[in-house]
Image: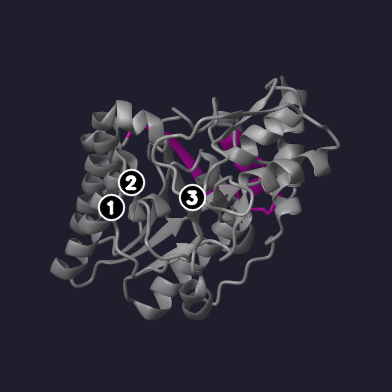
Amino acid sequence: ILVTGGAGYIGSHVVKQLLEETNHKITIIDNLSTGSIKTVNTLKEIAKHVNKENNLSFIEADLSNFSLIEGIFKAKNFDAVIHFAASIVVPESVKNPIKYYMNNTVNTTNLIKLCIENNVNKFIFSSTAAVYGEPDEIPVRETTPTNPINPYGMSKLMSENVLKDCGIAYKDFKYIILRYFNVAGADIKIRIGQRFPNATHLIKVAAETAVGKRDKIYIFGTDYPTKDGTCIRDFIHVDDLADAHIKALDYLTENNKSNIFNCGYGKGYSVLEVINTMKEVSGVDFKVEITGRREGDPAILIADNTKIKEEMNWQPKYDDLKIICKTALEWEKKLLSES
């Protein structure tokens, strides 16, 4: 299995579960722009611990180096690709759309092309709820119309369309598109987590504030049409999301058909609820400042997760805001002790 972006936040949790729960041989390709060699080293330790050190290899490479990536495909004989490597910061995508279309769409298209040319017929794609934009229906179903409102969401939707068209053109080529909602937390044993610098994710930022890495956290807008005026999001623990990828691989093997699934818990928490929960689990009454709305933040974004539960038999284990916040907090403490 090729895992692109396997040194990053979500990719590393999937690699961890592949090592612990399967016997697949895994090759990580990562350019380490947001992924970390420390994470790779921890994954190697995990592989050793479960007597599978020969099942994991790491190649530092950029997907834009098409000839190098082609050489890796020729040498490795992959059966499946799990594709994470992407740029993910929404405001940056608005300022620098070319970066997003080149990395998220062009590089993905080349990866798909290499799969088809090398007879790699299983492709799992890390997509996003951002493809829905500001949806008219809540909870959001897989059939809800896609209408991205920023280049990040559009770059991902374009890659989805490449996958769909290739699935029609090349009969053996099958894919699973996983549309993530708000991924948070860290490995339940606190071995790996989100190392991404200058993080923008709410729970990560709240945890950084609780341990004193930031002097305050901002709430962007308290005048939304919600119970407390702050935005509501569907937060999913990263280990549950990783499990969805293992299930997706099984699904492709057993059913040999392409599909799209939302990855969320089917319920939401407001920004204020998240901050209060982080204060509760940390015991720190950190400073919160209210500021204006950010452009492009929908008021409510919650997944309908009926399909993934029914068709992939996916059962979340960590559907608890306190667990998500606690693992995020413990991970930040671990990072502090490293520095």
- Spatial separation of the CA atoms under disc 1 and disc 3: 21 Å
| Percent coordinates x, y for residue 124 in the rendering | 38, 59
- Report whether 168 appears left or right of 94: left
- The residue that appears at 75% across and 23% down in the rendered structure is 212
- 214 or 187: nearer the eye? 214
- The residue that appears at 72% across and 37% down in the rendered structure is 331
- 267 or 114: nearer the eye? 267
Q: Are marks 3 and 2 in contact (CB under 8 Å)?
A: no
Identify which amino acid the numbered label 1 is placed on. Answer: Leu
The dot on residue 292 is none
Pointer 1 or 3: first along the chain: 1
Q: On the image, which quarter does residue 338 sit in?
A: top right
Q: Residues within 10 Å of mark 3 (few under 14, many from 20)?
A: some
Q: Residues within 10 Å of mark 2 (few under 14, many from 20)?
A: many
Q: Are marks 1 and 2 in contact (CB under 8 Å)?
A: yes
Identify the element where label 3 is drawn: loop
Residue 33 vertical position relative to residue 132 in the rendered view, above or below: above
Q: Please, which colouring scheme is shown?
A: one colour
- Report whether 180 appears left or right of 164: right
Identify the element where label 2 is drawn: helix
Identify which amino acid the numbered label 2 is placed on. Answer: Gly
| Percent coordinates x, y for residue 37 in the rendering | 55, 30
Q: Which residue is mark 1?
A: 157
- Report whether 60 appears left or right of 240: left
In this orientation, does residue 207 appear? yes
Asked whether residue 118 is drawn in magenta, I would say no
- The residue that appears at 71% across and 19% down in the rendered structure is 339
- The magenta span reads 39-62
Q: Which residue is mark 2?
A: 153
| Percent coordinates x, y for residue 116 in the rendering | 20, 58
Label count reads 3
The dot on residue 299 is 3
